């Protein structure tokens, strides 16, 4: 399974990719829900939540008929998404646009 990151409280932090891979194993019949819980030493409700999220994500992507962009790409600040903030913030002109030099 490799090294799994841990939060400050000691809980294991599984990536979305890892969760999706594990649920894929269950969906393909490689192992049962219970076997996955035992293998990863996690509660059944956690695996159920992962499965529900994976299934909901798939349904949303298909019903929207759109390409799915991994969240990791959005966090990277590449492309048009990284430039949105730069052009949407108001600029302080020091009151120069006001006829009396005062800020509105």
Image (spheres, rainbow, N blue to C red):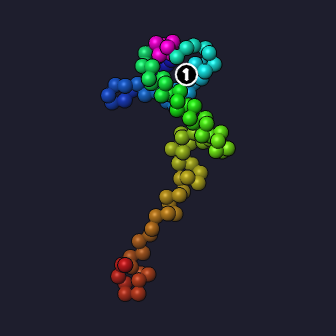
Q: Residue furthest left?
A: 9
Judge whether 70 appears above or below 44 on screen. Answer: below
Q: Magenta region's main secondary structure?
A: helix
Q: Residue at x 61, y 35 (%)?
A: 58
Residue 35: give x, y in percent of width and height.
51, 12
- Could you tell whether 97 is left or right of 56 in the image? left
- Asked whether residue 89 is drawn in magenta, I would say no
Judge whether 99 appears above or below 36 on screen. Answer: below
Residue 76: give x, y in percent of width and height.
53, 44
User: Is the C terminus in the top left, top right, bottom left or bottom right quadrant?
Assistant: bottom left
- Which residue carries the number 1 mark? 22
Quadrant hosting residue 95: bottom left
Quadrant hosting residue 55: top right
Judge whether 86 appears above or below 22 on screen. Answer: below
Dot 1: element:
helix
Q: Residue at x 55, y 14 (%)?
A: 32
Residue 16: give x, y in percent of width and height.
52, 31
Extent of the magenta region: 34-39
Q: Residue at x 56, y 42 (%)?
A: 73
Tell me the crowding category of disc 1: few under 14, some 14 to 19, or many 20 or more residues within 10 angstroms, Cα based. some
């Amino acid at each position: 399974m490799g090294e799994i990151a841990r939060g400050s409280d000691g809980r294991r932090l599984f990536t979305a990719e890892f969760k999706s891979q594990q649920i894929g194993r269950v969906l393909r019949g490689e192992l049962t829900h219970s076997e996955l819980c035992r293998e990863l030493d996690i509660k059944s409700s956690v695996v159920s939540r992962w499965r529900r999220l994976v299934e909901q994500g798939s349904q949303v992507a298909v019903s929207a008929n759109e390409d799915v962009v991994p969240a990791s790409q959005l966090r990277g600040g590449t492309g048009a998404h990284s430039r949105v903030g730069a052009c949407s913030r108001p600029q302080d002109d020091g009151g120069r646009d006001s006829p009396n030099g005062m800020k509105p």
